[in-house]
Image (cartoon, helix red, strand yellow):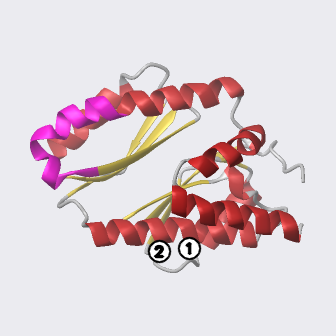
Amino acid sequence: MKSYKLFILFILFISQLVGCAPSAIIGIPSSILDRRTSENQIIDKQIFLASWSPIQKLVENEIQKSHYNLISYNRAILIVGEVPTEEIKNKITEVLSKIKDVKTVHNKMIIGEACNIKQRAKDTITTSNIKTRLFLEIKNEVHPLHVKIMTENNTVYLVGILNEKEADEAIKIAKSSKGVSLVVPLFELDASVKNKY
């Protein structure tokens, strides 16, 4: 088990240095461990790619005042960031809802100034820290590859298909991590799911 943890830490470390290449290395095992169906994994990638262009069109006149990130998971979209008006936020929800196969849109964007580069870097470190802690503290309660993490302005959003015990463990780790002011769990709770390791 210790060598498994060290391998995962090595992959995480390398991924911070060279970008996409380690995704290919870790992509195969992570897709096998994914609790989404293979069909939903493919659909989520399509939704993710289809989401960027309509948002870009909506904020193109306010690009300096806007910032956003999103995740597509099990046909639900989580979008976070900052936009200058409520009207733009509502339009973003509307266009994302119309993308093929989207079930739900969790629009957690706030109305205000776009966060600066320093804050974005801090959020990236917070996300990496939580991911690392999930691997280091791996127990039967939660498998780190079952939790998707996004941090925006010190608020951590957690997504995944978990049972209640796993969700509690993931929330506990996120809340106790450095730099976190708020944790927003958006899990799909499923009592039937269990870890197989």
Q: Nearer the viewer, residue 189 or 100?
A: 100
Judge from the rendering whether residue 3 lies leftward or rightward of residue 74; answer left or right. Answer: right
Find disc 1 in the rendering and name its residue. 175
Residue at the spot x=24%, y=36% of the render?
A: 56
Q: Which residue position holds label 2? A: 180
Q: Taken as a whole, is the magenta stretch helix, strand or loop?
A: helix
Q: Quadrant of residue 192?
A: top right
Helix, strand or loop at mark 1? helix
Residue 86 seen in the current view: yes
Residue 18 part of the magenta segment: no
Amino acid bearing label 1: Lys
Residue 65 in magenta?
A: yes
| Image quadrant where one finds the C terminus | bottom right
Q: Residues within 10 Å of mark 2 (few under 14, many from 20)?
A: some
Closest to the observer, 74 or 186: 74
Identity of the residue furthest to the top in this view: 100
- Estimate the x, y position of residue 108 in percent, counting from the top left: 36, 51
Is residue 94 at least partly visible in the picture?
A: no
- Report the residue at 84% width, 51% height from top: 195
Count of labels in the image:
2
90 versus 156 height, above or below: above
* Helix, strand or loop status at disc 2: loop
Q: Quadrant of the N terminus?
A: bottom right
- Residue 73 falls left or right of residue 181: right
**What segment carries the magenta color?**
52-67
Q: Is residue 180 left or right of residue 52?
A: right
Q: Is residue 84 above or below residue 133?
A: above
User: Is residue 145 found left or right of 138 in the rendered image?
Assistant: left
Q: Estimate the spatial distance between the alpha carbons at disc 1 and disc 2, rounded to whole Å.
A: 6 Å
